[in-house]
Amino acid sequence: MYNTGVFEDWVPRWLVVVLAFALNIPICMVVGTYAGIATVLTSESGNIQEVYTYAFYATYIGMAVVVPLFFQLKRMLKTRTILLRTYISVIVLLYITTVVTAPYLIVLLSFLAGAMRMIAVLEILGLLTPILAPKGQPFIKYSFLYPIMIAFGQIGNYVVGVLAFMYNWKYGYYAILFLQLIPILIVLIFVHNKPYTRKIKFQMFDWFSLFLTTAILMLGAYVATFGKVRDWLDAPEIIVAIGILPLLIYALQDRLRKLKHPFIRIDLFWNKHFNYALCFMFLICMFYSSTSLQTVFYSNLLQYNIQTQAELGMAMIPGILVGAGVSFYWFKTGNNFKGIYLIAICAYMISHIQFYFLMDPYIAKEQLFVPIAFRGMGLGISYIAIATYGAQGFTVREGLSSVFWLILVRSVIGPVLFASIYSNLLNYKLVDFTTRLSSKVDFTQPQTHHLYLQTFNKALSTGVDRVQAHQLGIQQLYLSIKTEATMLSLQYIFGTVILAGFVLILLTLLIKVPPINTRKKVRWRQALRGDFIRNHI
């Protein structure tokens, strides 16, 4: 006898929905390396901050490359087994992360944590899809799932940030770790252990293509992350990485063309909606990747601690929920993709314009809530709209295979490329503005003279000699110049992004975007039993 559901027969339908979301929420809070506490991790471990930036990217690379492997897991393991193993693996990986300091071991653990997270999310996605969208409407599914994933990702960052500030960064990891016990108990109590279909032998999997894909992505992220620190082509490891990348890319594409069952499905690019979705996602990543600039604004200019920064991140949640509601209503009423994409761009633009004019070291924290909320709105709409548009005309297996490319562009290629551009541009403009401002320092100016004398007299009142007081006065002038240079550099980059946003709006208006077609209904119940996957692999 084969059970067509996942939970025990005695579980009522309303409880099934609650349990499915309860399985999803804790895993959405898992990240191998939390970017919000990177400064704390750097100070305690002795590693440079780029190590944790690289580990953060490794999390999403792990999430992407594990997607093609998921089908093979479904063919040989039951849902109960998959969920138990992934949640237990996450617990083990998070605990090991708290006790190691070796850079590349941290990166490896983050990669594996991302892979385990994605396996659990895909499994839970299979449980929720027939409940949320029984007729196969992708906009309904994404309007519920993406807000939950993004919002609880922010909550996870908040929990880790607050505990890291109040106690120790390890307590944040422990909190996320213990939350994974909830879904484990749910699986043990409510998920049955019966097979859904006859057991299928494990098909030969293209492990070499998996290795090539992982190597290409990790090397690309390494060059973009460490290039500035290693001084680009003056570093042998950067030269080697750049030299190896084209060879690996050629080997991978040659292998994908020749294999009957390739690791990555490149035939998806025959779908014009999918191609447009990837292009639009890459372009809007220039807004999404400005998070690094906001972090510099919070920490360097406003001098906010990690708890305050985590609190500001929570302001995105109302915007995310509004974005989900707008997206749901927009697609439900049959409107086109171009309109909702323009709304996402406008939400991002409003956020960036407000940040541009709020670039001041003396603003109140409450003034940042509105631009952060608009950023959350743009993020929510862009995720839902692009995923819905790119899913047109795909079967279950093709739709899940497209997740690889979507995550790759949205969370790896776009953020890595634009964040690297912003980081290098910020470094260049900081030097440029610091040099300009320093050359204009004149002690005959009342403001400069007053700042120097104020620091000088204050130092004398503490008992230091005149030489040390003079040095402190000069240091205060330098700090003032550095603050001003940072503010001007951030304004320059935000202004550049805003101008690029206007170009993107114009480009979107001029391009003829294919309309959304009525998606074919998908046999989700057969997919859950495994019949659909068995017949199409």
Image (cartoon, grey):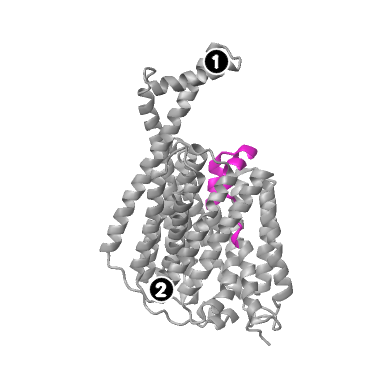
Task: Look at the numbered disc 2 and give the secondary structure of its residue.
Answer: helix
Q: Is residue 291 above or below residue 227?
A: below
The one of 489 and 273 positioned closer to us in this rendering:
489
Q: In the shown orientation, is residue 528 left or right of residue 371?
A: right
Circle 2 residues within 10 Å: few <14, some 14–19, many ≥20: many
Task: Look at the numbered disc 1 and give the secondary structure of its residue.
Answer: helix
The one of 233 and 139 positioned closer to us in this rendering:
139
The magenta region covers: 28-57
Q: Main secondary structure of the magenta part?
A: helix
Q: Is residue 299 visible?
A: yes
Circle 1 residues within 10 Å: few <14, some 14–19, many ≥20: few
State the image coordinates of residue 322 (x, y, percent, origin top left): 47, 64
Q: Quadrant of the N terminus?
A: bottom right
The one of 405 and 364 positioned closer to us in this rendering:
364
The one of 461 and 121 positioned closer to us in this rendering:
461
Q: Is residue 258 visible?
A: no
State the image coordinates of residue 225 (x, y, percent, origin top left): 48, 44
Residue at the bottom extreme?
1
Q: Earlier in the sequence, mark 1 or mark 2?
A: 2
| Contact flag, marks 1 and 2 (Cβ < 8 Å) | no
State the image coordinates of residue 519 (x, y, percent, origin top left): 42, 79
From the image, tell me which residue sits under label 1: 468
What's the amino acid at mark 2?
Answer: Phe
From the image, tell me which residue sits under label 2: 331
Residue at horizontal 69%, vertical 75%? 191
Q: Is residue 69 above or below residue 528?
A: above
What's the amino acid at mark 1?
Answer: Gln
State the image coordinates of residue 66 (x, y, percent, origin top left): 55, 63
Magenta residue check for 189: no
Q: In the shown orientation, is residue 316 left or right of residue 489?
A: right
